[in-house]
Amino acid sequence: MVPHLITTLNGPINELEQRVLESMPAIERWFRLEWMEHTPPFYTSVDLRNAGFKLAPVDTNLYPGGFNNLTPEMLPLAVQAAMAAIEKICPEAKNLLLIPEKHTRNTFYLSNVARLVQIFTAAGLNVRLGTLDETITEPTDLTLADGSILTVEPLVRTKRRLGLKNFDPCTILLNNDLSAGIPDVLKDLHEQYLLPPLHAGWAVRRKSQHFEAYEAVAKKFAKLLGMDPWLINPMYAVCDEVNFQDGTGGECLQAQVEALLNKIRRKYKEYGINEKPFVIVKADNGTYGMGIMTVRDAKEIVDLNRRARNKMSVVKDGQEVSRVIIQEGVPTYEQIDGAVAEPVVYMIDRYVVGGFYRVHADRGIDENLNAPGSSFVPLAFAESTQLPKPGTTPGASAPNRFYMYGVIARLAMLAASYELEATDPNPEVYS
């Protein structure tokens, strides 16, 4: 199943699909050489937007929380990739401590944790769950929607190691994005592998750093294929010292929005795209679809009402927003049953392990779909284990479309690798 691409402007993307398929050996060799020089993040998910004239990542998550949305058919890929990742880091690994978010009442999130436990258990590890929630002082059972149970336990910290009572792991896997800051219990662990590293969390990480790295990757890749990097790269700008509550920083934001809209207009004119450009303004750190707004005219910044200001002023865990990224808006012209959809690709180590479509019936083509009311449709990638089919008409083959999504998602993952290297506080430790 390939979602219906409702646009007459699908020429460039079909051409891109054709070029990507024809260049598959060169692309795979290029990635192979890149991974000889750079270490992929442990696991990654990438939100993509397909406008028909442009296909680009709009968000890259280094603590993905939707593994429960992958179909059972995709699990063998995830298990194989998990085995490869663990063997590379700690071949003798026996125990894995998984530290999830504190969302103990969110059954969808807990289903993701259960899926991670399933994947890493099948990869040959004893997996137990430790919690950063200090109110949990003894093993606590959490019941999932399907009636199954997860047990979370309080963490036990010694001088140099972190574990649970009677459980000493060699590897600690965070599925907590550290939006609220880095807890002391995770600091100064020198004898265990902490994945991802602490500077991958939102306490340190910035989206603008990621897209700066992605821009460099996109240029290298575009040169390989002989194409305009804009076709796969969303332009962006940054505004520091914004305060949505008292309105300071509004002039900077308005000027940056206007400048970026003008850049997009020039590109649309170059490609004959008859669309109204827009930008997405979002917090430079944080996730969960919070602190995001669509802006079609710079004047909208002046006219923000109190509700909009409140919505933009804080993100997850109540963190205040003081720095925003203004990102070129990439409309999504894919639809499933009349609702707008965007592909999300999941990776473990350097391997694509599956994906799904995030679908939202109440959102427009130029709005954020990561919002209450969204649903997930994995059927689109049901054929993902098939190899691409060169020679098939562009836009008609699910394996070909999925391969193209996988290529762009891996570019974002490679950018995350560049980004983590550039922001590593202790580069010599990992070299």
Image (cartoon, rainbow, N blue to C red):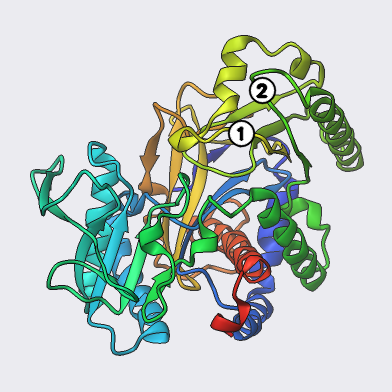
Residue at x 15% of width, y 39% of height:
145
88 left or right of 121 in image: right
**Residue 30 horizontal/vertical position (percent):** 67, 79
| Closer-to-camera residue (7/332) | 332
- Does any portion of residue 364 appear in the rendered image? no
- Residue 321: give its label: 1
Residue shown at 26%/72% (left/top)? 96
In this view, 273 is above or below 48:
above
Quadrant in which the C terminus is drawn: bottom right
What residue sits 43% from the left and 65% below the top? 187
Q: Residue 171: percent from the left, percent from the top?
A: 33, 75
In terms of secondary structure, where does tag 2 sit? loop
Residue 244: mark in rendering: 2
Picture coordinates of residue 412 (x, y %)? 62, 60
Q: CA distance from mark 1 to mark 2?
A: 8 Å
Precedes in sequence: disc 1 or disc 2: 2
Q: Quick one: SS at disc 1? A: loop
Q: Nearer the viewer, residue 395 or 64?
A: 64
